[in-house]
Image: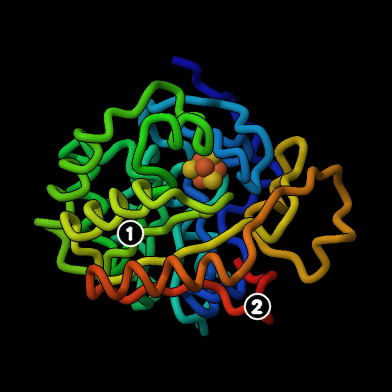
Amino acid sequence: MTTATVSRSKFNPVYGPVLSWRYGNSLGIDPIGEISTCSFNCVYCQLGEIEVKTQHRQVYVPTQQILQALAEFAPWDVDVITLSGSGEPTLAANLGEILIGIKTLTHRPTLVLTNGTTLGDPQVREQLALADQVSIKLDGVSTAQVQRINQPIREINLTHLLTDIQEFRRIFPGKLGLQTMILSRWSSSERQEYQRWVKAIAPTEIQLNTPTRPKPLKHELAGRENHASPENLPYEVRKLKSVHPSILKDFAEEIQAQTGIPVRYPPICHSQSV
Ligand code: SF4
């Protein structure tokens, strides 16, 4: 286990608001801190190469520090307050406390973006269920796909992952999204397997996406936000392959027809929003 020692002198755990095609005007909360920390190291991650790869839960940013910073943003004229930031937010052991604190302070809807790897832990499920909305990343339905795209710290057992998501679904009264990044055209068998997962999970909606922003070569706190001009970023980046919007549209229509679950994908004119 690697534990980061973080200097928080310039770090603000609240950032944005960020305009998102999926969630509207979203104020970001970073419960992870200045050092990017995640159980995945996705090839498209906007944080750059993840600095601390771990599945260890701990308090990374004290709840009080987050709530004090959030108070400065009153009256929180946003659609949603989103926990995401510099890594996997469910690694924050104070996740539940943060969600309760945000609600008490702002009375705004809360959203957590998660990669789902910690959902086997009943404490995580219980804390996460305090959010109004949760979006779970599902970028692949085979071990090879997940290894290639998400580069997890250890191989993901997909049978366990599906059971964990279903278990969370059972106790979660809020809106559950499945979020899938498409980097290349999926085969027919991959698409069918994905639809089997969708039927088994029964999410409220599915969000298909493809990379539209280049990946920073190293971690930049600014990677938490979106940028009006991704071509002129003040740090080194690598271009990512994306699929043509028609591939997202065709897959979305197929999923919706087969499962009855609404599928959203980014409008071309909003391709720069997160
Ligand atoms: S799960 Fe999110 S934070 Fe973690 S590596 Fe992937 S994109 Fe980055």
The image shows residue 177 at horizontal and vertical percentages of 33, 64
Q: Mark 1 highlights which residue?
A: 99
Task: From the viewer's perspective, tell me whether residue 110 is left or right of residue 41.
Answer: left
Residue visible at 86% across and 42% down in the picture: 236
SS of the residue at dot 2?
Answer: helix
Residue visible at 68% across and 61% down in the picture: 212
Instruction: Work out whether residue 137 can be spotted.
Output: no
SS of the residue at dot 1?
Answer: helix
Asked whether the beta carbons under mark 1 and mark 2 sit within 8 Å of each other, the answer is no
Q: Choose top left, top right, bottom left or bottom right for residue 117.
A: top left
- Report if the beta carbon of the residue with label 1 is closer than 8 angstroms to ligand 1: no
The image shows residue 129 at horizontal and vertical percentages of 21, 57
Q: How is the image coloured?
A: rainbow
* Residue type indicated by callout 2: Ile
Q: Nearer the viewer, residue 74 or 223?
A: 223
- Report if the beta carbon of the residue with label 2 is closer than 8 angstroms to ligand 1: no
Q: Choose top left, top right, bottom left or bottom right for residue 41.
A: top right
Q: Tell me the crowding category of disc 2: few under 14, some 14 to 19, or many 20 or more residues within 10 angstroms, Cα based.
A: few
The image shows residue 160 at horizontal and vertical percentages of 20, 33
Name the quarter where the C terminus is drawn.
Answer: bottom right
Q: In this picture, is 227 found above or below 186?
A: below
Q: Choose top left, top right, bottom left or bottom right for residue 135.
A: bottom left
* Residue type indicated by callout 1: Leu
Q: Nearer the viewer, residue 34 or 37?
A: 37
Using the image, tell me which numbered label, if any, was put on residue 268: 2
Residue visible at 63% across and 40% down in the picture: 34
The image shows residue 116 at horizontal and vertical percentages of 33, 44
